[in-house]
Amino acid sequence: MPFVPQRVFFESGSLDYPMAQRILQWFKAHPGVNINMLKPRQRIPHSPGASPKDAYRASKQTLVVGIRKTLNFQSCKPSAHYQLPLVTGCMGQCEYCYLNTQFGKNPYLRVYVNLEEILNQAFSYIESRKPDLTVFEGAATSDPLPVEPYTHSLADTIQFLARQEHSRFRFVTKYDDVDSLLNIDHQGHTMIRFSINADHIIQNYEHFTPPLQKRLQAAAKVVKSGYPLGFIIGPVILFDGWESQYQAMFNELKEHLSRHSNDSIRFEIISHRFTSRAKNTIMDVYPASSLPMDESQRKYKYGQFGYGKYVYPPEQMTSIQNYFSQAVPAFFPEAKIDYII
Ligand code: SF4
């Protein structure tokens, strides 16, 4: 499922890089994609007067090919030391997505073509932290897999970090097009995680993403290729019959992984939460959303950056914690739960 946008914009100077040339050739071979060259400092035009919903949808169909200028990596605690900036944005349209708040109503996808400079910077961070390991997260502000067919950024990064003894790499995806990553030298330095959920959540809220079965088929390929494997289950949303649907999800997961060694699988489980700002953005772009965002049904939790979020109240959090802390070992006795929050 590669991302084929309606419009591609090449920033000035980007075509000096081989990756941009490759992307240009890829889209020239896909008729129907509108290819545009931006002048220096020219902004990406957006439709004047478009409703937030239409502007959001148009942006989700827009790819920007650019040069990453800021090479100071942001920190990515607690799961990694640094964000590795390969891609920002995502072709998916999950109603609850944290990117909806981060990028507002113009959530273009942006790929960075100066990969060599980005990886050189990663190398400096690794050297400065030696002999400690340095862990990079490749999906902090994106899902990088749907653009991989033409960027090759993940494959190049995986191979580069395979050669760095003191580094580890991880990224998470909801997509399934992993074939180009299967036969490359990864040295076990990269953990590929899949974001999965109960069918009810996928069907109702995760638009333009593959169904669970496809994600699990991809996970089976990844584990067969010797990559460390992880799953993010989230957002966990409580609805009528949630336990039996998550049970069905685990059954399917077990079935797909049964032929492969799965004693080092990691799980991260994240309950649904929202901020007031996220709710406003979601209601602008998905006015008919049925996401449960009634503040009176939630507990307000103060955040470290001055704005808090609405989480499930303690009793419901306890139900979530009890369910998953029993279900994971029942299906995967050797797996490790990193956290249930
Ligand atoms: Fe957001 Fe992930 Fe859905 Fe993309 S696939 S819209 S990053 S939640």
Image: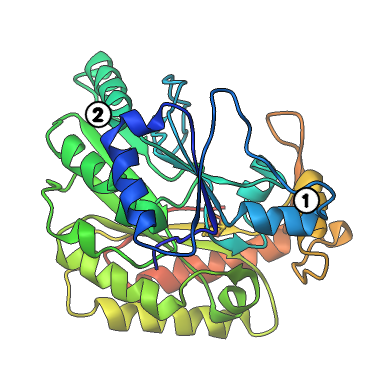
| Circle 1 residue | 281
Q: Residue at x 80, y 53 (%)?
A: 52
Q: Quadrant of ligand 1?
A: bottom right
- Residue type at mark 1 is Thr
Circle 2 residues within 10 Å: few <14, some 14–19, many ≥20: some
**Which of the image's four quarters has the N terminus?**
bottom left
Quadrant housing residue 266: bottom left
- From the viewer's perspective, tell me whether residue 279 is left or right of residue 215: right
Q: Residue at x 28, y 63 (%)?
A: 178
Q: Does the rendering let one see residue 214?
A: yes
Query: Quick check: 171 above or below 287?
Result: above
| Circle 2 residue | 133
- From the viewer's perspective, tell me whether residue 99 is left or right of residue 232: right
Q: Residue at x 70, y 29 (%)?
A: 305
Find numbered disc 2 in the image and state the secondary structure of the residue it sits on: loop
Q: Residue furthest top?
A: 128
